[in-house]
Image (tube, rainbow, N blue to C red):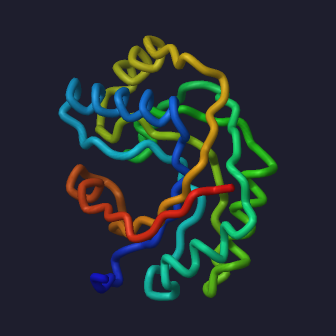
Amino acid sequence: MRETSANEILTFWLIPAEPARNYFQNLIHDLGARFDAPVFEPHVTLYTTDPSSEDARDFLERAVAGTKGCRLNIAGIGHSQEFTKTLFVQFAPDPDVDALNAKFCSASRSQEDYEINPHLSLIYKELPAEEKAVIAAELNIPFREVTFDLVKAVVSPAEIKSRTAVEAWRVVAETRLG
């Protein structure tokens, strides 16, 4: 396994199950092509920590032990000035996802808190607010809830503010829920 550097983080992602996984992957790909933006795997960030403090695979297995898949209800489509929340699907708060986040926190050697705000980004690109609002209004997600059945551990740059940073992400471990 490749060494991590001081300017990297270890992030854990909830990955949607089919058919949502395919739907969101195609949407991210289409938006990426339309706006010359990076293409990435659809995910909800569950927890983040220092990669030097954990063995990703062992930590992932400890944190998700006994956890079943979860479902999140879509609350709407949002956009912001933040690069990693350019345009996103916002999910309603969920006690099962909060509990899974708490399991990651308690399993972590660093005991870092991570305040979960369940959302799934659709594009990472600096765009005018008006354009983001138009894109958000055009979107019609064909389902109201999304099931998540996989968690991945990803090492990434500590700051995600560019295409290069997104393209530097690397999956180092994964496990199915349930």
Q: Position of residue 106 (x, y in %)?
A: 73, 77
Specify the quadrant that holds the N terminus. bottom left
Q: Residue at x 78, y 59 (%)?
A: 99
Q: How many marks?
A: 0
Residue 4 image-quadrant placement? bottom left
Q: Position of residue 141 (x, y in %)?
A: 53, 19
Classify residue 163 as left or right of residue 11. Answer: left
Q: Position of residue 67 (x, y in %)?
A: 73, 60
Q: Residue at x 69, y 55 (%)?
A: 178
136, 68: nearer the viewer? 68
30, 114: nearer the viewer? 30
Above or below, 153 relative to 51: above
Classify residue 121 as left or right of residue 97. Answer: left
Classify residue 36 as left or right of residue 79. Answer: left
Residue furthest to the right: 95
Q: Position of residue 66 (x, y in %)?
A: 75, 65
Above or below, 112 relative to 161: below
Q: Residue at x 35, y 33 (%)?
A: 28
Q: Residue at x 33, y 45 (%)?
A: 40
Residue 64 image-quadrant placement? bottom right
